[in-house]
Image: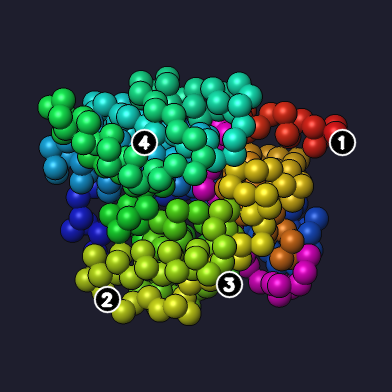
Amino acid sequence: MHLARYPRVRLAHLPTPLEPMPRLSAHLGGPQLWVKRDDCTGLSTGGNKTRKLEFLMADARRHEADMVITQGATQSNHARQTAAAAARLGLDCHILLENRTGRADRDYQDNGNVLLDRLHGASIERHEGGTDMVAALSRAAERFRTEGRRPYIIPGGGSNEIGALGYVNAALELLGQANDQGLRIDHVVHATGSAGTQAGLVTGLAGARTRIPVLGIGVRAPRKQQEENVLALAERTAEHLEIPGAVTAADVRANCDYVGGGYGVPTAGMQEAVSLAARLEGLLLDPVYSGKGMAGLIDLIRRGHFGDGENVVFLHTGGSAALFGYAVNLLDAESGG
């Protein structure tokens, strides 16, 4: 897996820290918890999408694009990081935002990630929940082409075999850090949505024959669909890396019991996870991805899913800017409302 063969622009602050979480570990009992701080990638408050954008933006340059277009939910971390990457590289950025939650309050619609999208100079196109966003993205690209532009389409979440290279690289980075620290990693856990992060991690760790299992805590799709999505993308990523067959269905595991009422809809578990991480570790999670991912991890620990003394690494995918779009939910939870 010689990633230097693939075009890349350097956008992220790497390597991101790998840190213990002693107070949360003591609070919960059971395994020793570690956090891989991909909230510290540096681009516009950081997050996991920056790793993917290093490869996607290089591909946009290779295609001589003069703009990028992408899509996501209203409070999309991916959209915010794409807008920031485009700004740094001098490209225009157009974002299609889907209101998957149906919320109309101003904080959700205009604060948090949406505020940062605008500050980075992106133009925004709004769509109702349930819109076929892939088709809408294609239509937007064609509209720009008729205007003489050269748009480069980045899929939602940056999740294709090019973007997933960012998390193949992250897997190798994590393995190097663990080796340097003498840390035996028994499990990696993270929030999984558009599949690119998990597909890249699985491809990197399985391709390196580490035998480290990756568990994705789903934030949107049912388990069967999520695992199928991750496996399909991991297989394409392995083929792109010229290591076909490196990933099997046994390497892909997702637990989608913590989605709650739907994508981006707050849950009591998410609210507890955000509060515990902030109060015990000074760590800011986000309400949509890392908050629900941590909620799943906490519940699984309480259920005895992990062995005492095992080392569990939680990959923090970032997204704290979205907290400001969910202030009313989080403040109500803190006050007992």
Dot 4 or dot 2: first in sequence order is 4
Marks 3/1 in contact by CB < 8 Å: the verdict is: no
Does residue 279 belong to the magenta stretch? no
State the residue in front, 44 or 309: 44
Q: Residue at x 27, y 46 (%)?
A: 56
Residue tagged 4: 82
Q: CA distance from mark 1 to mark 2?
A: 52 Å
Mark 4 element type: helix
Quick check: 290 above or below 192?
A: above
Q: Residue at x 62, y 49 (%)?
A: 262
Residue 103 image-quadrant placement: top right
Residue tagged 1: 336
Residue 172 is left or right of residue 139, and the answer is right
Between circles 2 and 3, the one closer to the viewer is: 2
Q: Which residues are magenta?
A: 302-322
Residue 168: x and y in percent read 36, 61
